[in-house]
Each structure stands twice: as structure tokens, then as C-alpha cells.
């Protein structure tokens, strides 16, 4: 990779940590969802201006729950005035609030991504302890009916036996389709946790079992493939590729995006909030110094370490250029050669 020509194609701003849900599989669980931990409007504007100068045309604002970020309306309007498109992932609950919904319609994001948590009241209660299913459904229906939107689901141990039902709920709410990603490693106090990750062998078996059912519900399915392609049946991966139902290789491997924490610290991955690699006004202060910082030897070394081949067998794999060996953080939990050995048996 010629790092001297590196550009930033996209960015995430972590605007807050406060959340009205407490999903136990969330990568941000270790942040404790502190109410006071939020990005100031002035910092958000500074970073956005830097990103615009660097050539970024699309910014995703994440949390926490970004609908609880106080400057959301002002920031959306600011980005619109700057010609920057914005995406906002949300659980959707706050859209059930009539006052918020009416205000939001005046200053919406360009895309609203609903992160789906359940398909019925019991699932919502069992998974995150919330009993506001009717409000949640109201909010999701409003999003699907009024905005350019997409729905996604983080597949984890709580959803192993009810995926078709959840997909059906999404379609009933007005979703045009659904993106399914797989729960990955969560870090808390420096320790990798896999409590809600479905082991690869079982995950693959479950998806193969349910695929035809969910395909009949909607043929608009996208799998965000953080599991190495080689572990799946070859024909299944080829079929997903031919249907355009697969996306893969995260920004760590592509090295084409940046993530900022609430205080302006630069992080390599959403899950690595405890391991920043730099900070605004300390290591960079404009687009030129940001690019120089990203391309400095130390940061190149960090990215090389995270994006290296998980196994020597990946070097000769025909899928590697599209697969990247899966999510690099999974290898903080699993040993690559043991996983590949399972596949060979």
C-alpha cells in the first residue's frame, strides 16, 4: 500500500455515550454509557471542517444513542450547509416521541440506520430488559415511512433461534431489506470478551439453516461478513457475491476511514475506544496534519499489526482480497489456525 497517497473516504464521529438501551453485546458497554460523555458542538464542527478539507463527503454519527445528543438538529443542518452527507445509526426508540419526531423532520440525516434489537415484546425484554416494544415499533415505522433508511441486526447468541421472526418484523415495519452483521469482540478494562459471539462453526450452521427462510421473507439481504470466507461452503459465498448480498473488509484493513471519540481522540476501531492512537490539537489540527499523522511510521505499524494475515494459509487463498481474513478483533478470542483446522476436518 502506498501510504503517501492515502485518502480518507469516510468518518465516524462518536457524539455521545449516553444510551436509552443497554444491549449487553454492544461494543460500547465498557464506556458505562455516561451521560456527561458527549462531543461538544464546537468540536464536532471543527472535526467536520477538517474532514471536509480532507475530501470526506460522508460522515456517520454514532453513540451511545445519537438521537440523545443535544446538538443533533444543529449539527445535521451544519453538515447540510457544508455539503456533507450524514448517516445516523439508532435504535429508533426516540422517534416514538412526537416532539422529537417533528423537530427531527426539519433537520434529518441523509440516511437513518435502524439497529434492530428484537422482533416482539418478549425478545426485547429478554435481550435488553426493555418493555417499550410498542414505542420501539412506532419509532421504527416512522423512520421507514419518512426517511431514507436501512435496518440492520447484530447477530448474537440471543438471536440464534429467532432470526426469521426478527427479519419478518423488520419487513412488517416497512424495511426494504435487512443487513446482518455478526457480533464481534468486545473489550472491557483491556480484556477481550466473547460472551455473545456465536462460535464460527455454529454461526455458519445457523445461517445456512435459516437462509432460505429469510430469503423468502425478503430477497434484500446483506451479510456484513466478518467471518473468513473460507469457513463457509464455497457455493454459498459465490451465491452471495453473485446476488450482491455480501460486504466485507473493514476500514482497518482498507485504511480509508477514521473514527473520533467524544473528546476528539482518534481510534482505529469502535471497539478500541480504550486504545486511542492520537488526539485533535495534540497530534493534528487540520486536514494536512491529520493525513501526515495517519501516515507516520508508528501508525503504519499499528495498522500493519492489526491487518496482517491471521494465518499463513491466507496468503494463498483466492478469497483473501475480498475477505481480509475476517474481523481482526476476532483473533483476540479465537486462534486462526485452530479455526482453519476445524474447516479442514
Image (cartoon, rainbow, N blue to C red):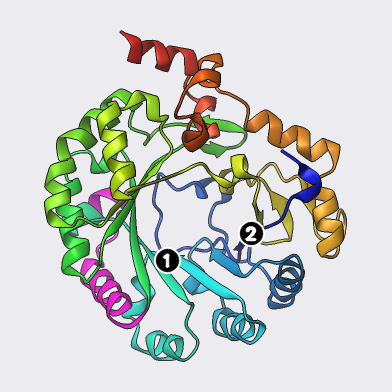
Res 9 label: 2
Task: Give how far across and how far down residue 331 sits, in percent.
Answer: 52, 25
Q: Which residue is mark 1?
A: 90
Q: Nearer the viewer, mark 2 or mark 1?
A: 2
Task: Give how far across and how far down residue 130 sits, in percent.
Answer: 29, 60
Q: Quadrant of the N terminus?
A: top right
Res 29 label: none
Q: Is residue 322 left or right of residue 224?
A: right
**Does the magenta run of residues contain 61?**
no
Q: Is residue 266 left or right of residue 122?
A: right
Give whichever of 64, 221 is nearer the camera: 221
For the residue carrying disc 1, how many other residues have a C-alpha within 10 Å: few (<14), some (14-19), or many (20+)? many
Q: CA distance from mark 2 to mark 1?
A: 22 Å
Q: Are marks 2 and 1 in contact (CB under 8 Å)?
A: no
**Does the magenta run of residues contain 129?**
yes
Task: Give how far across and how far down residue 246 sits, in percent.
Answer: 36, 46
Q: Secondary structure at mark 1?
A: strand
Q: What is the quadrant of residue 281 in the picture?
A: bottom right
Q: Secondary structure at mark 2?
A: loop
Q: What is the quadrant of residue 25 in the picture?
A: top left
> At 42% across and 29% down in the image, what residue appears?
228
Give whichever of 272, 133 is nearer the camera: 272
Viewer can see residue 185 = no
Asked if 24 appears above or below 318 in the picture, the reply is: below
> At 48% across and 13% down in the image, what residue appears?
337
Viewer can see residue 304 = yes
Q: Which residues are magenta?
A: 125-147
Q: Is residue 295 left or right of residue 124?
A: right
Give whichever of 116, 109 is nearer the camera: 109
Task: Give how far across and how far down residue 210 sits, in percent.
Answer: 16, 40
Amino acid at each position: 500500500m502506498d501510504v503517501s497517497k492515502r485518502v480518507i473516504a469516510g468518518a465516524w464521529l462518536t457524539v455521545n455515550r449516553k444510551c436509552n438501551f443497554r444491549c449487553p453485546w454492544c461494543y460500547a458497554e465498557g464506556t458505562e454509557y455516561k451521560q456527561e460523555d458527549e462531543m461538544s458542538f464546537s468540536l464536532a464542527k471543527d472535526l467536520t471542517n477538517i474532514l471536509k478539507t480532507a475530501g470526506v463527503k460522508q460522515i456517520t454519527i454514532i453513540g451511545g444513542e445519537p438521537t440523545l445528543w443535544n446538538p443533533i438538529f444543529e449539527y445535521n443542518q451544519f453538515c447540510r450547509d457544508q455539503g456533507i452527507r450524514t448517516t445516523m445509526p439508532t435504535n429508533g426508540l426516540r422517534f416514538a416521541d412526537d416532539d422529537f419526531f417533528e423537530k427531527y423532520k426539519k433537520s434529518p440525516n441523509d440516511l437513518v440506520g435502524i439497529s434492530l434489537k428484537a422482533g416482539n415484546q418478549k425478545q426485547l425484554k429478554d435481550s435488553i430488559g426493555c418493555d417499550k416494544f410498542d414505542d420501539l415499533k412506532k419509532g421504527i415505522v416512522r423512520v421507514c415511512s419518512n426517511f431514507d433508511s436501512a435496518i440492520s441486526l447484530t447477530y448474537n447468541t440471543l438471536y440464534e433461534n429467532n432470526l426469521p421472526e426478527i427479519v419478518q418484523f423488520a419487513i412488517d415495519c416497512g424495511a426494504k431489506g435487512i443487513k446482518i452483521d455478526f457480533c464481534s469482540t468486545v473489550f472491557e478494562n483491556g480484556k477481550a470478551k466473547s460472551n455473545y459471539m456465536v462460535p464460527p462453526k455454529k454461526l455458519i450452521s445457523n445461517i445456512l439453516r435459516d437462509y432460505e427462510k429469510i430469503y423468502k421473507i425478503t430477497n434484500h439481504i446483506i451479510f456484513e461478513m466478518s467471518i473468513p470466507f473460507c469457513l463457509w461452503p464455497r457455493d454459498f459465498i459465490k451465491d452471495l457475491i453473485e446476488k450482491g448480498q455480501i460486504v466485507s473488509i473493514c476500514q482497518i484493513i482498507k485504511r480509508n476511514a477514521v473514527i473520533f471519540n467524544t473528546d476528539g481522540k482518534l481510534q482505529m476501531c469502535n471497539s478500541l475506544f480504550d486504545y486511542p492512537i492520537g488526539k485533535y490539537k495534540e497530534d493534528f489540527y487540520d486536514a494536512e496534519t491529520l493525513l501526515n499523522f495517519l501516515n507516520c511510521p508508528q501508525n503504519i505499524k499499528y495498522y500493519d499489526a492489526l491487518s496482517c494475515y491471521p494465518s499463513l494459509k491466507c496468503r494463498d487463498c483466492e478469497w483473501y482480497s475480498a475477505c481480509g481474513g475476517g474481523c481482526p478483533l476476532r483473533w483476540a478470542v479465537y486462534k486462526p489456525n485452530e479455526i482453519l483446522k476445524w474447516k479442514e476436518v
